[in-house]
Amino acid sequence: MAYPRRRAQAGEDAFPGYLREARALLAARPAAVSDGPTGLGPDFEALRWFPLPPACLGLQPADHPADAAAHLAPGSCPAR
């Protein structure tokens, strides 16, 4: 049994388009990431070295911070 090893590849002429798309994506991002209280436990917070915007936990302003861990789920951070 043989598996064909053909992969679709874009030519070098596609590179400028990829750069334009990357620049547009970066320009659409906010300049700063909100790194407010997450409501997660102190053990988690002591290990956290990365920004974790509360919006990525699914928290809305009316949510209680103690409920943050219940909202933590893979893929729950909205793509912007």
Image (cartoon, grey):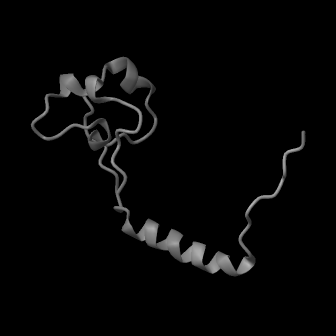
Which residue is farthest left? 62
Question: Residue 76, position in %: x, y?
Answer: 34, 38
Q: Quadrant of the N terminus?
A: top right
Toward which corner of the image does residue 28 lie, by quadrant? bottom left
Q: Residue at x 13, y 33 (%)?
A: 63
Position of residue 3 measured from the top left corner of the image (x, y, whole percent): 85, 45
Q: Nearer the viewer, residue 4 or 58?
A: 4
Question: Could you say where residue 21 lies in the image, as x and y percent from the top left?
Answer: 51, 72
Residue 23 vs residue 3, the one in the foreground? 3
Does residue 3 lie above or below 80 as drawn?
A: above
Q: x and y percent of residue 18 in the render?
A: 59, 72
- Considering every residue shown, the one lying at the far right of the view is 1
Q: Residue at x 39, y 42 (%)?
A: 51
As drawn, 6 above or below 22: above
Question: Residue 13's image quarter?
Answer: bottom right
Q: Is 50 left or right of 76, judged from the image as shown?
A: right
11, 24: nearer the viewer = 11
> Measured along the vertical axis of the image, is residue 8 above or below residue 66?
below
| Image side of residue 62 versus residue 5, left or right | left
Quadrant in which residue 11 is drawn: bottom right
* In the displayed structure image, the side of residue 44 where residue 10 appears, left or right: right
Q: Does 77 appear above or below 44? A: below
Relative depth, front residue between 38 and 57: 57
Q: How many marks?
A: 0
For the C terminus, the image quarter is bottom left
